[in-house]
Image (cartoon, rainbow, N blue to C red):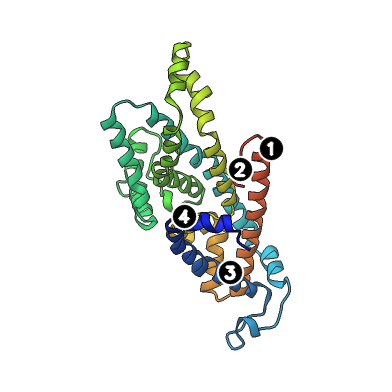
Amino acid sequence: MISKRLFHRMLAQKYLYLMVVPCMIWFIVFNYIPMAGIIIAFKKYTFAKGIFGSPWAGLQYFEQFVTGYHFKIILINTLAISFLKLIFAFPAPIALALLLNEVKLKLFKRSVQTLSYMPHFISWVIVIGIWGRMLSVDEGIVNTVLIKLGIADEPINFMLTSQYMWSIATLSEIWKTVGFSSIIYLAALSAINTELYEAAGIDGAGRFRKLFHITLPGIRPTIAILFILAIGGIFSSNFDQLYIMGLPPVLDKTEVIDTYIYRYGLQHLQYNIGAAAGLLRSFVALILVLLTNKIVKMLGEDGLY
C-alpha cells in the first residue's frame, strides 16, 4: 500500500518516473518474460508437446552437462580467459583515466580520448578482422617486425595457433574497451574536490603522493562497484569475440560456456543442455556477486546494495 507521503512524492517527480517506464518495459519484455523459458532445463522438451506439456526430467541435463566430455575444456577456457581479462583488462581503463587526468594539454587529451573510444563502436567482426590482418603471415605488421628484429625466423600464424588465443582475446578486449570504460573513471575523477590537491601541494605533496592519498581513494568506490560487476561476469566470456575467433584449429582454446551453449543448444538442437548450462552459469555468477559484494562491504566500501 503506497503511503500518502510517498504518493505525493511520486506525483511531484512524475516526469522522472515516466522517463524510467520505457526502460522497465524493455527489461520486462526482453529479460524477465524470457526467463520463463529456463524451465526447459528441467524438462524432456519436444516440439510436439511444447515447454509446459513436456515431461519433467529433474536434474538430468545438468548432470549431462557437468559430466560431459567438453565440460572440463570449456570450464578451463572460460576461467582462464576471464581471469586474464580481470587481471589485465579491468585495471587498464583505470590506468588510462589516471594518465589522462594528469594531462594538462586539452587538445592532446581530447585526441587521445577520441582515438581510444573509437574501437568501442566497431563490431567484433571488424575488430577480429583488423587483428587478423595485423597478425597475418602475409606481410602482417607483427610478423614483419618480429622477423626484422630477428625474434622469429619465419612468419607465425597467430590466429590459427592455439597457444596464442588467450593472449589475443585479452589484448583485443583491452584495445576495444579501454577507452570507453575509462569514461566512468574520468567522471569519478572529476568529482574529486580540487581543493584537496591544492592543500596537499601546499603541504609539499608530490604527484605520486597526491595519486595514492587523494586520487585513488576518491575513485575507490567506483572501482569496487565495477569490480563486483566484473566478478559477476567471470563465467560470461565475450560471446561475439570468442565465437568469431573460434576457427576449428583453435577451438580447443576458444570454446567457452557461452559458445558451447550456442553450438550445442541451438545449432545441435540440444535445448535442454543449453538451458541447463546457461542456468548453472547464471547461478554461479549470482553466488560470486553476492560473495564479492559482502567482502567489499567488509572492507569498508558501500557495495552494490
Q: Is residue 254 visible?
A: no
Residue type at numbered disc 3: Met
> Dot 2: what SS?
loop
Q: Earlier in the sequence, mark 3 or mark 2?
A: 3
Q: Residues within 10 Å of mark 3 (few under 14, many from 20)?
A: few
Nearer to us of marks 2 and 4 is: 4
Name the disc covering residue 242, or none.
none
Name the disc covering residue 303, or none.
2
Residue type at numbered disc 4: Ala
> Dot 3: what SS?
helix
120, 304: nearer the viewer: 304
Q: Position of residue 39 (x, y in %)?
A: 64, 73
Q: Quadrant of residue 53?
A: bottom right
Q: Position of residue 271 (x, y in %)?
A: 58, 74
> Dot 1: what SS?
helix
Residue type at numbered disc 1: Met
Residue on which the image places disc 3? 35
Q: Residues within 10 Å of mark 4 (few under 14, many from 20)?
A: few
Q: Is residue 179 left or right of residue 277?
A: left
16, 193: nearer the viewer: 16
The CA distance from mark 1 to mark 4 is 37 Å
The CA distance from mark 3 to mark 1 is 32 Å
- The structure residue drawn at horizontal position 55% and vertical position 47%, both measured from the top left corner, is 230
The CA distance from mark 3 to mark 2 is 26 Å
Q: Is residue 130 visible?
A: yes
Decide: is 280 above or below 182: below
Q: Earlier in the sequence, mark 3 or mark 1?
A: 3
The CA distance from mark 3 to mark 4 is 34 Å
